[in-house]
Amino acid sequence: MNPSPATAGTASAATPAAAQRPTILLHPSGNPAGKPTTPYLLNCWYAAALSREIPAEGLFSRQLLDTRVLMYRLADGSPVALHDRCPHRFVPLSMGKRCGDEVRCAYHALQFNGQGQCTHNPHGNQHIPTAAKVRSFPLLERHGFVWIWMGDQPADPAKLADHSALDEGPASAIAWTYMPMQANYELIIDNVMDLSHVDHVHGEIISTRGQLSPIIPPVSERDGAITVRWEWQQQPPMGIFAPFMAEPAAPARHFLNVTWHAPASIQLSVGANQDGGPMDLAHTTGQYDLHTCTPASEGQTHYFFVTRRNHVVDDEGFNAFKIKAMHDAFVNEDGPIIEAVHNEMGTTDFFALNPVLISSDAAPVRVRRRLAQMIAQEGRYK
Amino acid sequence: MNPSPATAGTASAATPAAAQRPTILLHPSGNPAGKPTTPYLLNCWYAAALSREIPAEGLFSRQLLDTRVLMYRLADGSPVALHDRCPHRFVPLSMGKRCGDEVRCAYHALQFNGQGQCTHNPHGNQHIPTAAKVRSFPLLERHGFVWIWMGDQPADPAKLADHSALDEGPASAIAWTYMPMQANYELIIDNVMDLSHVDHVHGEIISTRGQLSPIIPPVSERDGAITVRWEWQQQPPMGIFAPFMAEPAAPARHFLNVTWHAPASIQLSVGANQDGGPMDLAHTTGQYDLHTCTPASEGQTHYFFVTRRNHVVDDEGFNAFKIKAMHDAFVNEDGPIIEAVHNEMGTTDFFALNPVLISSDAAPVRVRRRLAQMIAQEGRYK
Amino acid sequence: MNPSPATAGTASAATPAAAQRPTILLHPSGNPAGKPTTPYLLNCWYAAALSREIPAEGLFSRQLLDTRVLMYRLADGSPVALHDRCPHRFVPLSMGKRCGDEVRCAYHALQFNGQGQCTHNPHGNQHIPTAAKVRSFPLLERHGFVWIWMGDQPADPAKLADHSALDEGPASAIAWTYMPMQANYELIIDNVMDLSHVDHVHGEIISTRGQLSPIIPPVSERDGAITVRWEWQQQPPMGIFAPFMAEPAAPARHFLNVTWHAPASIQLSVGANQDGGPMDLAHTTGQYDLHTCTPASEGQTHYFFVTRRNHVVDDEGFNAFKIKAMHDAFVNEDGPIIEAVHNEMGTTDFFALNPVLISSDAAPVRVRRRLAQMIAQEGRYK
């Protein structure tokens, strides 16, 4: 399962090729030297925020892919995103004020609409320079997230994978959380694509009783999405499901189905049954989760998570308890390990450190290579 | 008013030219690689400290232009400035002790006089090596400031602009303040050379009631000094003057006259009258201010300010109130914007970011270009 | 005593030569670019820890020469050292758990023995990849220290200088301490090799009454060890010895003998007598000290110290008082000076700053040159 040295070197070998390209799209972050500034895939959707993070009024600013982005909602509720930098004197527009559907800069009161066009200049003859525009970013609001497109190609809604399963069911059976992490986003993808760590990192409540590690799970790819799947039996069932099953102490069949979509979303379904029925969410006590990561920078990641369950769906108290427990597990159990790895690596180029890979790395390694390939195809270094 | 791209590129185009020069003056900051270490104009006067900051006894150390400088006063009260680094083992001399008019190093007790000459070596045969000198810097004490000359050319007192207006009048009508800023010094110059921000950034007390922004103020240059001037009428007068005028609620004519002198001093006169008299400080209720900036480094600035007014000149309580109000406005209103701009830019090369300039930028842009030209003439990069 | 410019340049002149070498040993710290990562001498013994710092059970981690090192004791008490990084996903092994004489990684439970060999992989078919090894480092436990060998050549116990004098005598006459310093380790060596600072930096208790500074002490070299020696008379004797001497207020002869061994250990003997006997520890009231430094990085040092005295050897209270006093003197008196020098230098290349050297620098300069020469001989840059 270890990559040959030649294969492991593929990702970094893309650098010289990218350097030879005559034109490279410039990202809007301040880069006076004209060098490509991002190692990220750009023509795709990233989660910019939970829907609830962008208020009905007011301004919300977050660094995404090394660029500060201002987000706010128009009077009709639709969100807009602008480069959070006045093109005049480079003040963050988020320091300014809302004026209806527009934002006024805090320094000299230039005013911009939701498309980033300057609409008012109170100075001199009030002429608005043609260049007085702020880059705006296409947004999609779906499944309780606001998704952003930061690439140079036209935004393509079809590139956001279908997670409509999240939209079906009561509000008391779905919950979101947000976790800033001091680590490269690919380390978080690795963590979710390889669940063999579950019995070693996490506590009793999601223990597989040692059943997961010995499995060599099949990895498959379809339309660019990469899936890894585990099935096993354990007794008693996973702690998160046992209380809601017919026989909480009896054996149960379990499945975990984990699918990565570019750039950094991972859909995880997990469930268990005791009746020999099919291993899917329609026939198990289970849940549909979405992990999605957005780099703030190469060393800082916005980690978003949502979970919808198909049991005790009307219990708001349980809903709140469950999301808090999952949030705390990510922050207190996965988080310190992932951040320590990031610090120890001293690079974001995983393969350059010659990792000793094992069977459970098949899925995350395949994702890393696919993502590197996609970034290289965009003409950026990786 | 926007510069053509060719013009905007002038400043950064100076870099290759400077790089071709065969000899470049080395500054005394530690630079083992022999590269030019400062992007600053050197053969000129910078404010090193307020006079009151350098005590009659004791030692005062401050980083100026990337170099730590020790300042102290001789028994006769005259200030001296030395590179704050023992030439033996590089201990900051400010960690040592005063011995009369000399300073003794904390580590091995080498002693230096106010000219930087080693006068005592207690070790071995007590021989003083010829090279045992600390660089000393010429100082001028004027207008409540101690000014320093850090260049390689002979210090020229004529290069300090005449601000003797500050010296005329009672002590209860003049006040100084010091504000460390986490931003490049040119952003502070920009802020004072373009006062169109006043109605947008500051509060009621210096509001021009929207009169200032529509003006396209004339910019002029004489003997290297660049002046921008506004005149307007408003009702009521500016809040800082109205209470001291004949008719506090009636219209008044106002003027603002702002003059930059290299490298980083800006003299600002502002006044108002209601009798149709000339628009100058002799005929208005007004004040004479001096803003002066000294880089600690490219990203940190010592911002000094003094103001002398021509009204209520004997009220010490009002004097204290007024300087506190101005200090707080700079720190709490201008400061956060300037520091946010510095952070957002990610460079100190303003033009490299292709700013969209408007009419009110005429004066600060002219200052930036003039300063870049002067630095290039000294043979340093800009 | 000043070096000629040519001589002072020798150390840095080694850089280009080293750069031309075709093969350079790679250190285990993460360095994807394949450049030599350490400026340190590697084929030698450094103090990794005080013996008491490595517990009988549990794990102890410390950064040494830019590399995190995990240390623990086997059931038989012998210490082992491993690169503190799982070769699989680069988690610090110190985040894991002890399993008998082995350590289990916190992330995926790969298990390693004290030689760094992976002994268990719970995943898939449990195959252990051939490459699943952690680098282990030879250790020697002597004189209350655990010494580590981080070079590529076979560990050579003979390269650890003989300090068996530390082992002879009661436990109540020896004490150790550990002091982390924010400075390059060579500045600490300088400090101990040139004791002319004693009367200027330290207090009454070790004052030589001005006798030390005027001496030009002989410097000698034998088998690579460099020794500097002072002898003098003072009245009263040094404060640390006077109370234990026959006539505490009478004159006494003193000696200081200071010997550096590569890379960073300095043995210091100091004593006084009033009977005209030989100037050595057998015939004086005195003590045998060992200062030893290990770089954590170029700017951070682990400073270890041990002292054994030949008087009041059975007083445990005095023993505790004495080590605390010495620890506090190093931390509060030498420490701030050394750290300020490090900050002010802005480089670790002392000679590049053209220091003005005096007679007392003979020994530390000789050590610096010898060490630079040894590092260059290893084929690394200095």
Image (tube, coloured by chain):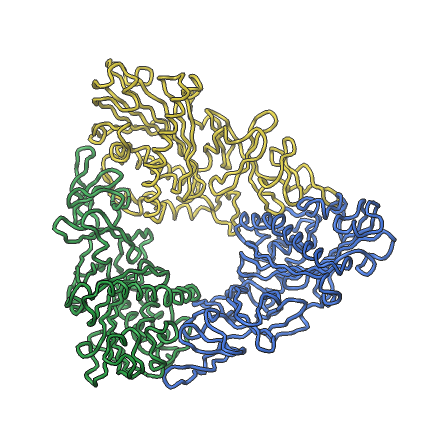
Chain colours: A green, B yellow, C blue
Q: Is residue A123 left or right of residue C152?
A: left
On the question of residue B296 being in view, the answer is yes
Q: Is residue B124 left or right of residue A105?
A: right
Task: Name above or below for residue B365 compared with residue A260.
Answer: above
- Residue B252 at x, y = what percent? 23, 19
| Among the 4 quarters of the image, the one containing residue A334 | bottom left
Viewport quadrant of the N terminus of chain A: bottom left
On the question of residue A379 being in view, the answer is no
Task: Name above or below for residue A131 compared with residue B175.
Answer: below
Q: Is residue B110 left or right of residue B290?
A: right
**At 58% across and 77% down in the image, what residue appears?**
C75
Q: Nearer the viewer, residue A166 or B203?
A: A166
Please give the count of numbered marks on the rendered protein.
0
- Residue C105 at x, y = what percent? 44, 74
Q: Nearer the viewer, residue A292 or A323?
A: A323
Task: Name above or below for residue B207 compared with residue B369.
Answer: above
| Among the 4 quarters of the image, the one containing residue B57 | top right
| Among the 4 quarters of the image, the one containing residue A49 | bottom left
- Residue A18 at x, y = what percent? 31, 65
Viewport quadrant of the C terminus of chain A: bottom left
Q: Nearer the viewer, residue A377 or A333?
A: A333
**At 73% across and 42% down in the image, what residue appears?**
B126
